[in-house]
Amino acid sequence: MLKVALIGPAGQLGTEIVASKPGEVELVPLGRNALDITRPGEAESVLITLRPDVIINTAAYVRVDDAEDEAEEAFRVNALGVKYLAMAAKKTGAVLVHISTDYVFDGGKKPSPYNEDDAPNPLNTYGISKYAGELYVANFTGSHYIVRLAGLYGRAGASGKGGNFVYTILNKAKKGEPMKIVDDIHMSPTNAADAAREIWRLITEERPFGLYHASNGGVCSWYEFAVKIAELAGLKADITPVPHTAYKTKARRPLWSPLESERGIRPRDWEDALKDFIGSL
Ligand SMILES: NC(=O)c1ccc[n+]([C@@H]2O[C@H](COP(=O)([O-])OP(=O)(O)OC[C@H]3O[C@@H](n4cnc5c(N)ncnc54)[C@H](OP(=O)(O)O)[C@@H]3O)[C@@H](O)[C@H]2O)c1
């Protein structure tokens, strides 16, 4: 039986990875109390005892704006912690599955979504720290999957962010609060349950190691995403499109970061995935 250690099991993505565990897998959830990836030596000692075949790392510092003021902490989790994990994976011979982000891209002029062959150039500290993590995984382990996701939403809400965009829009729409949502930033929103299924597929089908884009398919602006959330929930919402310059944020964000895969990941469209999510609430 395949033994899989999951880091960040209570997070938004981790919760869905637990929920969609295939029958032939023994899953060992490792919460932060069992393994804090930022503590030097801890990953190695925990994983040498556990001897998993596969390690899935969903742990991250995900507060994009705060990362500008807390760069050391962002790097401690997203880069150094990942280095410790990569070294432990190499030492124990485990396959490392590491989750990354569309924010490794700069959103520069591109007529189509980014695929795995496009060159990263992150604009903000979160993206730079996540890209550094990718480099540690790619260069410190032989057997790895780096899975980039975008605009993630799931039942658990991002514990690091205190919710997610879908919950925020639903709550405001229910209260009848008017909303101003950015319509000039485009991405591929991703249902965490779909992402979890793709991750399990990579592992159980023993797909070639390397980098994969696994967001839901298609492209939308945050405004279009918000309108669709309210529509699918049957809520009347007062949503006004605004340019990103209407909000002052600490972190610069890529204006264009939809993802697609050239490596055989064929996820369903974001609207279908969102419909399922809203229906399940
Ligand atoms: N959210 C998005 O929109 C988005 C978009 C693209 C990519 N991603 C990537 O997707 C992955 C999962 O994101 P998510 O939304 O599921 O995040 P999340 O809900 O915040 O979950 C992250 C998990 O990591 C754990 N964690 C944080 N620091 C840790 C540490 N030092 N040691 C061990 N565990 C630690 C957290 O535990 P605690 O609960 O104890 O803090 C939490 O359970 C991340 O790699 C993120 O960069 C997210």
Image: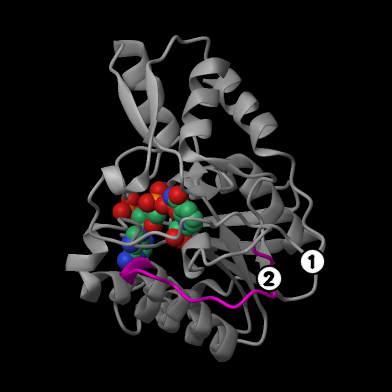
Whether residue 280 sits left or right of residue 165 in the image: it is right
Decide whether the magenta segment is chiefly helix, strand or loop: loop
Left/right of residue 50 with respect to residue 197 in the rendered view? left
Q: Which residue is mark 1?
A: 263
Residue 190: quarter of image:
top right
Q: Residue at x 29, y 69 (%)?
A: 74
Residue drawn at 33 percent across, 30 percent down: 180
x then y, percent, for residue 129:
37, 74
Q: Are marks 2 and 1 in contact (CB under 8 Å)?
A: yes
The answer to whether residue 91 is above or below residue 114 is below
Q: Position of residue 177 (x, y in %)?
A: 28, 17
Q: Quadrant of ligand 1?
A: bottom left
Q: Earlier in the sequence, mark 2 or mark 1?
A: 2
Q: Amino acid at mark 1?
A: Arg
Q: Is residue 44 visible?
A: no
Q: Amino acid at mark 2?
A: Glu
The way the protein has been coloured in the rendering is: one colour
Looking at the image, is 77 positioned above or below residue 179? below
Dot 1 falls on a residue whose secondary structure is loop
Q: Position of residue 26 (x, y in %)?
A: 64, 55
Q: Whole-percent x and y of residue 91? A: 55, 89
| Secondary structure state at the residue bearing disc 2 | loop
Give the residue drawn at x 41%, y 69%. Answer: 127
The residue identified by callout 2 is: 116
Q: Which residue lies at the image location 51% right of the left edge and 68% below the top edge?
A: 105
The front one of 72 and 231 is 231
Q: Which residues are magenta?
A: 114-126
